[in-house]
Each structure stands twice: as structure tokens, then as C-alpha cells.
Image (cartoon, helix red, strand yellow):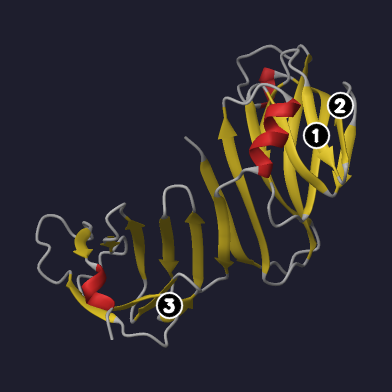
Amino acid sequence: MKWYVWEAGITSGAEAEVVTTVNQCLEKGQPVWIRNGKKVCQMNPGDSVGGSLKWVLHNGVGYIFPEGGTVFCQDKMQTGNWYDINHTASREQVGKQVVTVGIRHGQKPAAGTYAYLVVPDLQTAGEMEAYCKDASIRILKNTPDLQVVRNRKLKMWHLVFYAPGTFESRDLSVRADRPYILQLRETKEGRLVVHAADPAQSQQLLTLDIWKGRTSSRPFTWQCDFSQDGMLPGASRMIQLSSDCFRL
């Protein structure tokens, strides 16, 4: 199991720096490994590293940054007291070693982006390096209007259309006339299983044009009707397409 997290269109007019926190947790004596450029090393308590981090590994969880960015990691002592959040609690200062991983977007970012993968059950820097070399997940598009990720091993695409648009690639192309979420998976038999969902619950008709390959081939057009959802607005619809659907 693994997760990908992404965002686009990060914009702010404030003077304060904009930062995305990827993770913050107690160190608990667990080593923190990083790849900074071409160097793989273990951080020491008190360290703060930033710039060109490719990945971070801590407590069995890896964080991979395929699009780069100003990624930082710090392993620092943080102090505070419980009184600040509950005035019936003690004012005694408490200190803990805390690991923080984040992405800096700077001051007044315009159309900033980020993307990272979260991969559990990796215990060593060697395992992390091996996973990165054989990573099957590729982020193909990350804009305010369209986000696309592909898992090559599972032969699966996930697409999020925030506006009408077209995604085009060598293996698969899709055009949607409305904002929707799509999942497409190719089976061993060569069928294409398509799921469409309407999380905004617009209850409208979605028209999808799907190409196996680029848009120069013949598309299959699917009109997916969400207008009669009743008690299940936005629930996903599914269709299976054989290779015959795309023949010229």
C-alpha cells in the first residue's frame, strides 16, 4: 500500500512564508535517513537539512519527492507546556525530539505545486533506494485544472478533472466535458475498466472520449448519466471496454 499526495495552484499574497508540512512526529530514537542530491546519509539530532532532498525515511515510512521542490527535514528539540492549550494543566515546560518534513513555497507564491509519495514498511536506506529505482508510480500532470497519476505495474491511471479538458499520452488519452474523477485500469485480457465518480454531486450528464493511444485514433464515447442518482449522488459508475471499441 502506498499513497500519493499532490497540490497545484498554491498562491498567497501574504508576507509570511508558505510551507506545506508533509509529516511531523516524535523521533522516538528512530534514525532519520535522507537523500540530499547524490548523497545518502543519516541525520543527527539537532540537524536541519533543506534544498534538494529526494527522499526522507523515518520510523519505517518513506517520503519521496518526484517533482523536487524546496524540501526540508529537521530533527530538533521542541518545547512547550500544556497550559497554553488548557489553562487547567501544568505550566511545566516539556521537551521532545521532533522530526519535521516539509516543502517551502516561499513568500507570495503564485501557482506553486507539490507532489510526494508516502510508502510504508521500508526499514533501511537501501530498501528506500531500491524502491525509488523501481518506482512504478508516475505523476503525469499536476495543474489546477487536471491531475493525472499512473501506476505502471497495476496498469492503472487516476485522473482528476477540475475543469473540462483533455489528457493525452502515448498509451491513453481522455477528454471530459465536466469536472469529474476517473480511474482506468487495463486488464490482462486487454480490456479497459473505467470508473467515473462525481464527488461534487452535480447530478449531470458526463461525456467522456477515451482513446487507446493518442487522439489520432478512434475514440470511444461514454455518456455517463449522474442525473438520476437519487439517494446515492456522486456514486461511481463503471464500464468495461474491449479492444474492439477502439478499432478504426
Nearer to us: label 1 or label 3: 1
The quadrant in which residue 193 appears is bottom left
Report which residue position mark 1 lands on: 34
Q: Alpha-carbon distance for marks 1 and 3?
A: 37 Å
> How far is mark 3 from mark 2, CA to CA?
43 Å
- Between 177 and 84, which is closer to the camera in this rendering? 177
Residue 139 rendering spot, x and y as whole percentages = 57, 59
| Mark 2: few/some/many CA within 10 Å (<14, 14-19, 20+) | some
Location of residue 88 with respect to 118 vertically, above or below: above
Q: What amino acid is labelled 1 in the image?
A: Ile
Mark nearer the N terminus (3 vs 2)? 2
Specify which label sits upstream in the sequence, 1 or 3: 1
Q: Quadrant of residue 31?
A: top right
Label 3, residues with CA under 10 Å away: few <14, some 14-19, many ≥20 = some
Helix, strand or loop at disc 3?
A: loop
Give above or below for 248 relative to 57: below
Q: Which residue is mark 2?
A: 43
Q: Image check: 73 left or right of 200?
A: right
Asked if the residue at tag 2 contacts the one at tag 3, i.e. Cβ–Cβ closer than 8 Å, the answer is no
In the foreground, 73 or 88: 73
Residues at marks 1 and 2, CA–CA distance in whole angstroms:
7 Å
Is residue 168 visible in the rendered image? The answer is yes
